Amino acid sequence: VTRCPAGQAEVEMAELYVKPGNKERGWNDPPQFSYGLQTQAGGPRRSLLTKRVAAPQDGSPRVPASETSPGPPPMGPPPPSSKAPRSPPVGSGPASGVEPTSFPVESEAVMEDVLRPLEQALEDCRGHTRKQVCDDISRRLALLQEQWAGGKLSIPVKKRMALLVQELSSHRWDAADDIHRSLMVDHVTEVSQWMVGVKRLIAEKRSLFSEEAANEEKSAATAEKNHTIPGFQQAP
């Protein structure tokens, strides 16, 4: 479907508020808001109606300042303005029928840039994770590649997967897991077959990273302790 440049911004904003992944809604069903808006700070603020205007001390009713000090009555018709309105010069105003400036085309995420870090994370987990788990993750990633190459994934799903991979590579596990949840809520019909493997890969990579960090800290503490003990000699 070809979008006109002027309506592209409206379509993008609509995707922020209504879930595009649910195709079973009826024409009279209320809109379903996206996961990102559901996780933001509570609903609309309510105006406080408990404030009262303080009564005057002397008990006399308040009168607006404009009524208490009226100006002098107008004497005769107002003088004519010396500056007559000028007609706008030709070509200065926006002409009707001129199309607005087109928006930049959306840059679509590249499949290799998403799959390569996921496959590398899976290789890092081999040897530390059970073979059955690694094989299941590999099968799910193959489904992701097949659907991506077959054009079955929408642009919002591809963009969120690119962000998820960035967070995973930067060891920001909570952010990656939050993107995974948003995909499951907003685009469940597209990602349900392979997102389970991505979720398990995030958990296994996080566990491996924590284990390696703990071992490094333990080794550093042991080495520092051996150097600080007076008269300590290592066995030949």
Image (cartoon, rainbow, N blue to C red):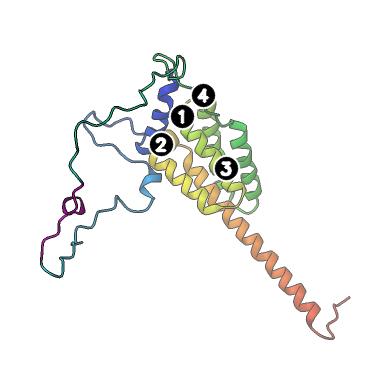
What residue would you read off at disc 2?
187
Mark 2 vs mark 4, foreground winner is: 2
**Magenta stretch: residue 18 in it?**
no
Q: Which dot marks residue 165? A: 3
Cα gap from disc 4 to disc 3, whole angstroms:
21 Å
The answer to whether 207 appears left or right of 69 in the picture is right
Residue in the picture at 42% in, 15% down: 95
Assign a secondary structure to mark 1.
Answer: loop
Relative to 123, residue 150 above or below:
above
Q: Which residues are magenta?
A: 60-71
Among the 4 quarters of the image, the one containing residue 54:
bottom left
Where is residue 108? Give x, y as percent: 55, 29
**Mark 4 vs mark 1, CA separation in Å:** 11 Å
Tell which of 65 and 171 is nearer to you.
Answer: 65
Disc 3 to disc 1, how far (Cα)?
17 Å
Amino acid tagged 2: His
